[in-house]
Image: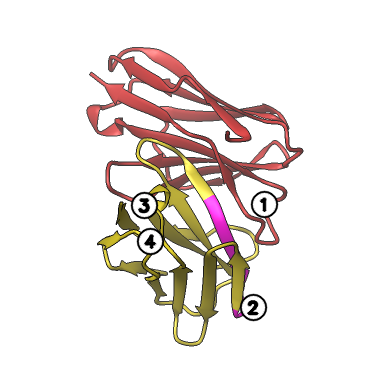
Amino acid sequence: DTEVTQTPKHLVMGMTNKKSLKCEQHMGHRAMYWYKQKAKKPPELMFVYSYEKLSINESVPSRFSPECPNSSLLNLHLHALQPEDSALYLCASSQKHFGGQPQHFGDGTRLSIL
Amino acid sequence: KQEVTQIPAALSVPEGENLVLNCSFTDSAIYNLQWFRQDPGKGLTSLLLIQSSQREQTSGRLNASLDKSSGRSTLYIAASQPGDSATYLCAVLNDDYGQNFVFGPGTRLSVLP
């Protein structure tokens, strides 16, 4: 069982919908990450939060809006997505953003855009 | 720009064989290297993390080595089992602040009973 929990596991939405992905960890980690993974490709970093502050935004389109309401929760708000945004969205956490700490991943949310 | 490659792209072996997965990176100035396992439709499970000052790490039947100067890491799996079937990814961290965490494309491993 993973210690990083992501909900929902699957999401199908239209291009005009607004939805949110949720990630939760209770390991006391202070760094949390969003990755996007297309089929048969490695994960690509989207956002990094360190101590609840956005630390890195890898030039992600504004239709993806991250939020870190507290040290245990990370959300990804979705609006007006495109079909090419269909992918597996992975959340990860680590003790700290710096110091090369190992990252722990959730099982992901599989997103399909109609 | 750091580039990470993995050879082979896919591997099929009979149960019980020892095997080696390879990871290469172009910029040797890495902070650490991490090996992950990914089962179909699942997230990533961290297997081993090697800091740049280390040469190898071991966990059970897994041994990972790092040769930073040549830009290479290997993951050795002893006495492979069908449960080892998964995609194995390596990822390198280029700096202390995680601003460049780059994954390789992965090796898809099938261990046949």
**What chain does mark 4 sit on?**
B
Disc 2/disc 1 C-alpha distance (Å): 20 Å
- Horizontal side of residue B111 vs B2, given as left or right: left
Q: Do labels 2 and 1 touch, CB within 8 Å?
A: no
Disc 2/disc 4 C-alpha distance (Å): 20 Å
Q: Nearer the viewer, residue B106 or A47?
A: B106
Q: How many marks?
A: 4
The residue under the point 36% across, 42% down is A37
The residue under the point 27% across, 22% down is A113
**What chain does mark 2 sit on?**
B
SS at mark 1 in the image: loop
- The segment highlighted magenta reads B46-55
Disc 3/disc 4 C-alpha distance (Å): 11 Å
The residue under the point 34% across, 67% down is B6
SS at mark 2 in the image: loop
Identify which amino acid the numbered label 1 is placed on: His
Tell if the residue under mark 3 belongs to the same chain as the one under mark 4.
Answer: yes
- Horizontal side of residue B18 vs B14, given as left or right: right
Judging by the rendered image, the residue that carries numbered circle 3 is B87
Q: Earlier in the sequence, mark 3 or mark 2?
A: 2
Where in the figure is residue B36, as x and y percent of width and height? 48, 55
Disc 3/disc 1 C-alpha distance (Å): 26 Å
The chief SS type of the magenta part is: strand
Judging by the rendered image, the residue that carries numbered circle 1 is A97
Q: Do labels 3 and 1 touch, CB within 8 Å?
A: no
Q: For marks 4 and 1, give the one nearer the viewer.
A: 4
Judging by the rendered image, the residue that carries numbered circle 2 is B54
